[in-house]
Image (tube, rainbow, N blue to C red):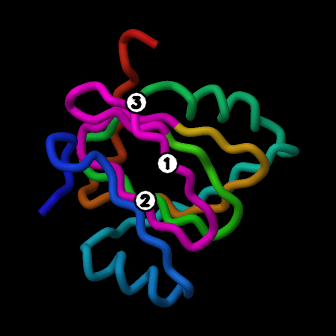
Amino acid sequence: HQRTCDMAPYEKTHFESEEAAQRFLAERGFKDAAPGRLHKDDEGFAAAATRNWTWHRHPAEEVVYVKEGGAHYEIRDEQGEVHEVDVRSGDVLVVGTGCWHRFSVAEVLDREQLYSDKAGWGREDHPQQ
């Protein structure tokens, strides 16, 4: 079953090995991984940082597997409460379907981004930032 905002808006799990993380992702049916790396010294980092700190949501569960570095997420539940979540290397973060969220990267974030459904690649920005 898919995680939604009316349940817990997110799930975070830490794995000691990439093999264990990949097994978890496969068992849960997360697929179509897109690797992505954000580094503070890269050209375009400032623009990406601004876009990522914009409240947005996806029409399917979003999954982030952190391979290196980390990020700070803010995720809103159905009642509007903001949950702050820090992720680091080895963490898998599942953001519920339709949950408003945003994130920031201080130094580097090397990740795989996956969705439970191809529709998840869609993105809706919050109308009131």
Q: Secondary structure at mark 3?
A: strand
In the rendered structure, find residue 85 and report the number of the disc placed on it: 1
Task: Name the amino acid, label 1.
Answer: Val
87 part of magenta stretch: yes
Measured as percent of width and height from the top left, residue 28 is found at 25, 74
Q: Residue furthest right?
A: 41
| Label 3 or label 2, whichever comes before in sequence order | 3
Is residue 29 in the magenta section? no
Mark 1 or mark 3: name the one nearer the start of the chain. Answer: 3
Residue 13 percent across, percent down from the top left: 42, 69
Q: Residue at x 40, y 30 (%)?
A: 56
Q: Nearer the viewer, mark 1 or mark 3?
A: 1
Q: List x then y, in percent, for residue 90.
A: 57, 73
Gap between marks 3 and 2 measured at Cα: 16 Å
**Residue type indicated by callout 2:** Leu
Q: CA distance from mark 2 to mark 1?
A: 9 Å
Highlighted range, magenta: 74-102
The residue that label 3 is drawn on is: 56
> Label 1 crowding class (10 Å Cα cut-off): few <14, some 14-19, many 20+?
some
